[in-house]
Image (tube, rainbow, N blue to C red):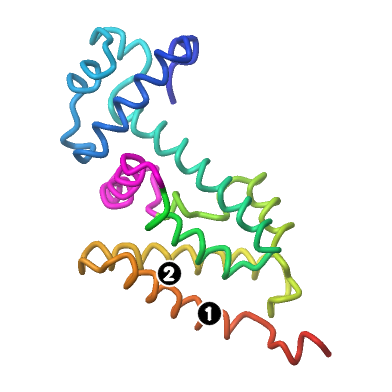
Amino acid sequence: MPKQTFFNLPDVKRQNLIEAAKKEFSQVPLMKASVAHIIKMAGIPRGSFYQYFENLEDLYSYLLEQETKKRKEDFISLLRTKNGDLIETVTVMYHHFLVEMPDEEERTFLKNALLNVTNRDGFSLTDVFDMEQGKEHEKEVLKLIDRDRLNIKDDRELLHILQIISAVLFRNFIEKLLKGLSDKEAIDNFTIEMNILKRGIYISETENHK
């Protein structure tokens, strides 16, 4: 985590440093990132950087944590909009990530994050889309999901469903990158996979109206 001196910075200086770091990490993976490049773009002395962060990994961890928090907030917002329909929410969220995310730098940073944290202790490749992590987030998600649509017994089964969906989403994203699939191809594949899951975990319309 950042040192308190980072949080004591004026908003403009703090944001300049964050934007410089995002730019660097969107252009190169963490192992090739440079403190020199970041401080040059941010317009701060090298010594100041180490007053704010222990090292590049510390800064990278903070950025990823902030992005993860934002994605979780987006998921909850979409879940409300889709009246608790879990599969529809996840499908739309994935479409937003691939196609509609307006900030290309942010999208590239997240893509690099998913590809380049595999060997780093303390990170999960599904963190960005993990719908279970964090107790407050978990409670909110469990409360919002329309359980009448689902063939589940309890919260434990619902959490397992969330983990399965998260794993399928990540596998689809990696397949897209490795095979060079277009956004449309990846979304079409993901929609098929979500529909297969839906047939397994959703109550049929006939049963739902008994």
Which residue type does callout 1 highlight? Leu
- Kindly indicate the quadrant of the structure image that contains residue 19: top left
Task: Pick whichever, 83 or 167, lies toward us.
Answer: 83
- Is the C-beta separation of discs 2 and 1 under 8 Å? yes
In the picture, measured across the screen, residue 44 lies left or right of residue 133, that is: left
Residue 127, image x, y percentages: 45, 50
In the picture, measured across the screen, residue 205 lies left or right of residue 109, that is: right
The N terminus is located in which quarter? top left
Rendered residue at 49%/15% (across/down): 7
- Give the residue at mark 2: 168
Q: Is residue 39 above or below residue 140?
A: above
- 10 Å neighbourhood of mark 2: few (<14), some, or many (≥20)? some
- Give the residue at mark 1: 197
Residues shaded magenta = 102-125
Residue 190, image x, y percentages: 41, 72
Residue that extends furthest to the right in the rendered view of this protein: 210
The mark found on residue 69 in the picture is none
User: Residue 168 colored magenta?
Assistant: no
- Kindly indicate the quadrant of the structure image that contains residue 180: bottom left
Q: Is residue 19 above or below residue 10?
A: below
Rendered residue at 34%/33% (across/down): 60
Rendered residue at 40%/38% (across/down): 64
